[in-house]
Image (tube, rainbow, N blue to C red):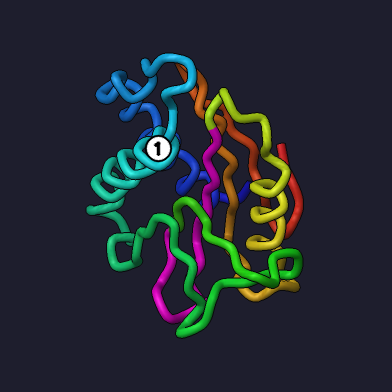
Amino acid sequence: MNEEQSFLVSKLKCAVENVYREERFLLTYSEGDREGLEQAFVFRVGIQLSNLLRETTYASLDLDSEYNKNHGNTKTSIRFQNGLRPDLIIHQRDSNKKNMLVAEFKGWWNNNIEDDLKKLEDLTNPNDNYHYLIGVFVKIGQTEATYRYFINGSEHE
């Protein structure tokens, strides 16, 4: 991981940790009552991340959740020809020149992660449309998150 990728990951991790510290009620729902929890968690991470990026060189970029557009068209990739919707991205809208970070989130109660991992591979693939600098899979745990990283279309330690 290069310095810029490490910086972006550190800011994302800090935002996630802030949500765990400040928004514990999001993680205390009972069994079967988790609908919308992932989206709420991502939203809160986005707020925290926006605050962390405010005084950095990334402040001029856009931070979006569930963003499914590529210019005026649907965001597609090699394996998602019908479209895809990344959970959280740092990019410049209406351009693929500054696609910096793409993140997919999944809660501990949901082990169906294959599509999320494929999305991160595609969105960071230098041979596809977007070339995100780094992709991060965030597994939302009950007390802390775990992370997996994607660079140039493949998973990295």
* Quadrant of the image occupied by residue 57: bottom left
Q: Nearer the viewer, residue 119 or 125?
A: 119
Would you say 7 lies left or right of 41 here? right
Which residue does the image show at 66% across and 55% down from the upper left?
119
Q: Is residue 101 magenta?
A: yes
Would you say 139 lies left or right of 26 here? right
Query: Number of marks in the image?
Result: 1
Which residue does the image show at 48% across and 16% down from the upper left?
31
Local crowd size for mark 1, using a 10 Å CA cut-off: few (<14), some (14–19), many (≥20): few
Q: Secondary structure at mark 1?
A: loop
* Quadrant of the frame with the C terminus: top right
Q: Position of residue 24 (x, y in %)?
A: 31, 19
Which residue does the image show at 65% across and 61% down from the upper left?
124
Give the answer, above or below, for where 121 lies relative to 82: above
Give the answer, above or below, for where 82 lies relative to 3: below
Q: Position of residue 105 (x, y in %)?
A: 52, 40
Residue type at numbered disc 1: Gly
Give the answer, above or below, for where 132 lies relative to 135: below
Q: Is residue 70 magenta?
A: no
Which residue is outermost to the bottom?
A: 72
Q: Nearer the viewer, residue 75 or 144?
A: 75
Task: Give the residue at mark 1.
Answer: 36
Q: Position of residue 17 (x, y in %)?
A: 38, 27
Which residue does the image show at 58% across and 60% down from the upper left?
133
* Quadrant of the image occupied by residue 76: bottom right
Boundaries of the magenta span: 90-106
